[in-house]
Image (cartoon, rainbow, N blue to C red):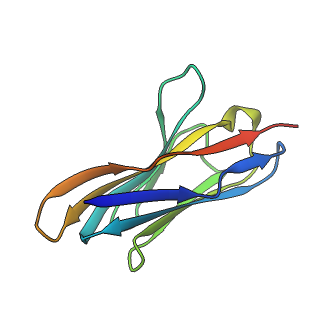
Amino acid sequence: QVQLVESGGGLVQPGGSLRLSCAASGSIFSISTMAWYRQAPGKERELVARIYSPGSTTYSDSVKGRFTISRDNTKNTMTLQMNSLKLEDTAVYYCYAGITVVSGRFYTAWGQGTQVTVSS
């Protein structure tokens, strides 16, 4: 079994910054892709940013240049630095990871979500 736990959400004014963190735990052998998704009320869940095991990244056009995804493979953690936040960034943010446990089984794991609200 594996678990992802997010932290760092909250309320921020437009133009402000927040930093989200995601920590993976369990009998982890390796983690391949990690990513952040978000879901706003009444909308489908969408990919925000993705980071691969070697460290290459991709971003949605809506956050490119404002958000930065990173990971620490030694600690099995991932962060999302969000700058210049906009009202439309308001959503529940979810952490995702592709995890191989020591038994060799592969899991696609999701965190419970953390609320980010951008409001004046």
Q: Which residue is painted at 45% across and 68% down in the image?
A: 77
Q: Is residue 50 left or right of residue 115?
A: left
Q: Is residue 37 left or right of residue 99?
A: right
Would you place residue 39 above or below residue 19 in this image?
above
x, y percent for residue 76: 39, 71
x, y percent for residue 28: 26, 70
x, y percent for residue 100: 20, 63
Q: Quadrant of the C terminus?
A: top right
Q: Is residue 37 left or right of residue 3?
A: right
Q: Which residue is painted at 36% across and 67% down in the image?
A: 25
Front residue of this view, candidates 106 and 51: 106
Q: Is residue 43 left or right of residue 55?
A: right
Would you place residue 52 above or below residue 44 in this image?
below
Front residue of this view, candidates 80 and 10: 10
Q: Which residue is painted at 25% across and 60% down in the image?
A: 1
Would you place residue 34 above or below residue 70 in this image?
above
Front residue of this view, candidates 88 and 1: 1
* Quadrant in the rendering for residue 80: bottom right
x, y percent for residue 87: 76, 34
